[in-house]
Amino acid sequence: MRKNKIIFMGTPDFAVESLKVLMKSNYNILGVVTSTDKKRGRGKKISFSPIKNFAVKNNIPIHQPKNLKSEEFISLMKKIKPDLFVVVAFRMLPEIVINIPKYGSINLHASLLPNYRGAAPINWVIINGEIETGVTTFFINKKIDEGDIINKKKITINEDETAGSLHNKLMKEGAKLLKKSIENILTKNVNRKTQNISLNDKKAPKILKSDCFIDLNSDDKSIIQLIKGLSPYPGARIIHKNKTFKIIDAKDIINHEAEIGLSQIGNIIILNNNNRESIQITKIQEEGKKILNAKDYLRGNKL
């Protein structure tokens, strides 16, 4: 067992892979900090975060502060005397918390910083048609995603990549990079690099509902990038005959003389933009229903 004391902070599945890798590497994880429990679904049942579920199964102490600035949480962290806070997909830390550990606090971010700082880098790199992205580890400071860089790893974005498939790639590569970065810190073998922040850096703000609606004035390539960049969640959307549909996957095809918007031609679903450039919808989800292959949807429904 390694003696250095680590507190891990995270919430979603993306963070679980990193925690798994650190546990397998025998790092001394003294506790996890994660979001408070939520009531979900029609039955309003209590739901744990993926990180909490993993911590429960592995007997790791769990901390769920409502307020990271609370005296109770800060005094508890100081009492533990951690060597390092490791943060993956969590809230922004207050400055008073960042500076508690001996070696500071580090974060894993799913882009090649300084580009795509923000909450949704995986979505935006695909929406913007990038051919390359990656993962970055850095020391946290009081500004969002602007701390000194520890390590980076580049990853190619495939032509058929979706946010879901890229998420899984970056999750695994990020976990490996995080392990390497922690080793660098604990062996005092870190070459900190200041980020060259510029107004021209590409941003990755939180995806809003308004970002999800397909603009039929866009060209076919941009529409497909939006669909793939929001697949499977939250899903690119279009309103057709007063119903909202999520378009989960699509591909470019030869232009069809179909109406603008969604239409059915035989056993395929076509989306035409205002320039009558055609896209074939391959996976679709009608509001309130499950995701279906387009052909399966058309077996029981008409557009």
Image (tube, grey):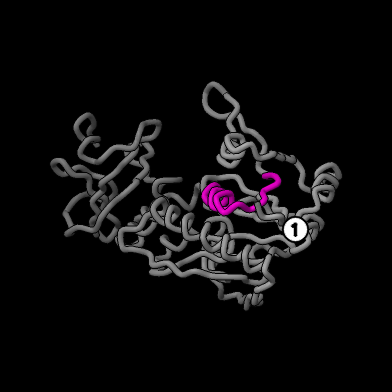
Give the residue type that dot 1 points to: Asp
Please name whichever residue, 115 or 97, is drawn nearer the observer in this view of the structure: 97
**Does the magenta portion include 31?**
yes
- What's the residue at 57%, 39% (across, down)? 54
Position of 76 with respect to 220 (left or right) is right
Position of 212 with respect to 265 (left or right) is right
Residue carrying label 1: 83
Residue 89 x/y as whole percent = 59, 52
Residue 42 x/y as whole percent = 52, 23
Please name whichever residue, 167 or 264, is drawn nearer the observer in this view of the structure: 167
Q: Residue furthest front?
A: 1
Residue 37 x/y as whole percent = 64, 33
Q: Residues within 10 Å of mark 1 (few under 14, many from 20)?
A: some
Q: How many marks?
A: 1
- What's the residue at 70%, 50% (across, down)? 7
Residue 208 shows in the view: no
- What's the residue at 69%, 44% (across, down)? 31
- What's the residue at 29%, 56% (across, down)? 273
Residue 161 shows in the view: yes
Q: Quadrant of the C terminus?
A: top left
Q: Quadrant of residue 116?
A: bottom right
Please name whichever residue, 117 or 97, is drawn nearer the observer in this view of the structure: 97
**Does the magenta portion include 36?**
no
**What kind of element bears circle 1?**
loop
Residue 75 x/y as whole percent = 85, 46
Q: Is residue 149 above or below residue 119?
A: below
Tell me the magenta residue range.
16-32
Q: Residue furthest top?
A: 43
Please name whichever residue, 84 or 232, is drawn nearer the observer in this view of the structure: 84
Q: Is residue 197 above or below residue 232?
A: below
